Structures are given as structure tokens and as C-alpha cells.
Image (tube, rainbow, N blue to C red):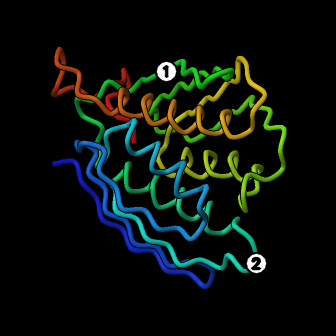
Amino acid sequence: MRRAEIIRNTSETKIKLKLNIDGTGQQVIKTKIGFLDHMLELFTRHGRFDIELECDGDIEVDGHHTTEDIAIVLGRAFSEALGDRRGIKRYGSMILPMDETLVMAALDISGRGIACLNVHIPASQIGSFDTELVEEFFIAFARELGGAIHLQQLAGKNSHHIVEACFKGFGRALAEACGINEVAPDEIPSTKGTIL
């Protein structure tokens, strides 16, 4: 069972997370930032992960700590649940259309954390959410997961659609990368013999 439970408390956020990689897309997500809740629900549903997430953060300051710390905990949970990465496909990708928007999401669970975003979000805010935090989210997730995350905007003008395509596409790419390789279910997918 590829599951993880993490509790992380700091002076800025208090987070509880339960993750089941091999789920059906069930979620209970409470971050106190409506747009972030929506994006995480889409990520969860499209990746078919089961997630219970609750965050009490210092949103009276802004959404930065909440967004970044949730990504830290999520990336860490996926890393923990995947263990030594034995049997996973390792790579995943998705070209996702969202109305006028088209975003390519690609992922390599390589043991090396990096996020490369070529995404132009016209609006500085969507609801109360600062759109510059999209990049911060994926940087923190990539670092804790130990993976290379690439998000490339191929088309799009609407800020909501662009961010939504990023989260949906990433959910699907991550699900593919975490999937079990039926041809080599007992092999670590690296010529080095280790990914960690």
C-alpha cells in the first residue's frame, strides 16, 4: 500500500496530510485559500490520488507560507509513499487542453528536484491567490519529491484556465510516473541502481 501520513507544524503553518497514491480521487482539502483548494482538488481528481489535507496557516499575512508548505508536505508524502521507487514508470507527461489554453506537463522522478516553468499568467491574483505562488508551489514539490517537473504553456490567455491546466496536467503526469511498470515491477528504473 503506497500511503503516507505527515504532520508538519511550524510557526507559520500547521499541516495534516494523509495520502494514498493508489486511490480513486477522493479528497477532503481545507487550506483556507479557496482557489488553492480548487487547484488541489483538481490535481487529486485527475491523478486519482486520495488526499486528506488540512492547513492552518498565517493567511492574514498572505498565502505564501500556506502554499509553499503544503507543497513541501505533498512532495514529501509522495516521496515517502514511493519508497525506493521500485517498479515505478518514473516518467510521466500530459498535454492538457483547457478551453483556449494548452499546457504540457512532464515529470521525471529522478531523485533530483527541479521545477522549470515557462508559463505566463496575465493576472497577478485569482481570487485571493497570488499567481506568483504557482511557481513556488511546484519548486517546493519538486524539491521534496526529488523530481524534475516541467510545465510549458503552449497556448492560453485566461489566467484561471492556465493555472488549472498546470494542476490538472501535473496530476495526470504524476499519476503516470507513479504507475507500476508491469514489464519490470521489481526493478528500480535507473542504470545507477538507485534513485534516492
Q: Is residue 101 above or below residue 161?
A: above
The residue lying toward the viewer, choosing from 50 and 140, is 50
Q: x%, y% of residue 180?
A: 23, 27
The residue lying toward the viewer, choosing from 127 and 80, is 127
Residue that numbered label 1 is attached to:
94
Near mark 1 (Cα within 10 A), the count class, few <14, some 14-19 or many ≥20, is many
Q: Is residue 166 above or below residue 133?
A: above
Q: x%, y% of residue 151?
A: 63, 29
Q: x%, y% of residue 21?
A: 28, 45
Near mark 2 (Cα within 10 A), the count class, few <14, some 14-19 or many ≥20, is few
Residue that numbered label 2 is attached to:
61
Q: x%, y% of residue 118?
A: 75, 28
Q: Which mark is residue 152?
A: none
**Identity of the amino acid at label 1?**
Met
Of the 4 image quadrants, the one containing the C terminus is top left
The residue lying toward the viewer, choosing from 106 and 48, is 48
Q: Residue at x 53, y 62 (%)?
A: 70
**Identity of the amino acid at label 2?**
Val
Residue at the front extreme, as displayed: 99
